[in-house]
Image (spheres, helix red, strand yellow):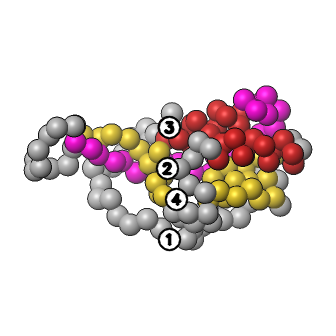
Amino acid sequence: MLQPKRIKHRKVHPGRLPKKATRGFTLSFGGFGLKALESAWINSRQIESARRTMTRFIQRGGKIWIRVFPDKPVTAKPPEVGMGGGAGALKEFVAPIGAGKILFEMDGVSEAVAREAFRLAAFKLPIKTQFIKR
């Protein structure tokens, strides 16, 4: 799964979700894309699951670009542990996504195939998405 090779700080503050994407909201590589319509944290498992679904559907026919990378560490305390004692251990890495951000791009396949592949991938993501084309 996607995760950074090394990070500067093991535990970071949660911060705020971006309302709208300030970068990465236009197609750069492929002819078709999957755009986020909501803001959320998307974790590495969800990104990998969507990628596998698309790759399996297009049967390695076209090319897929992943435009998001989970580089924000999230911590969690184990179940049934009382309050206090600081932040818990590292749980996962997430990518903070703003509305309008392009998540995936695809090229080398027909529009119908790309649309269906993105539809299947969208089921794996926790946000509403939209199919876009150049």
Q: Quadrant of residue 76?
A: top left
Query: Residue under circle 1?
Result: 19
Disc 1/disc 3 C-alpha distance (Å):
23 Å
Query: Residue under circle 2?
Result: 42
Mark 2 neighbour class, 10 Å CA radius: few under 14, some 14 to 19, many 20 or more: some
Query: Residue under circle 4?
Result: 97
* Vertical side of 121 occupied by 34: above or below: below
* Left or right: residue 133 compared with residue 51: right
Query: Residue under circle 3?
Result: 45
Q: Tell me if residue 48 can be seen.
A: yes
Q: Would residue 128 be counted in the magenta stretch?
A: no
Q: Which amino acid does label 1 sit on?
A: Lys
Q: Which amino acid does label 4 sit on?
A: Ile
Expressed as whole percent of the image width and height from the top left, the position of residue 120 reads 69, 41
Secondary structure beneath label 4: strand
- For marks 1 and 2, the one nearer the N-term is 1
The residue drawn where x is 79% and y is 28% is 59
Most foreground residue, 29 or 21: 21
User: Which region shows up in magenta?
Assistant: 56-77
- For marks 4 and 3, the one nearer the N-term is 3
* Left or right: residue 25 compared with residue 84: right
Disc 3/disc 2 C-alpha distance (Å):
8 Å
The residue drawn where x is 63% and y is 53% is 103
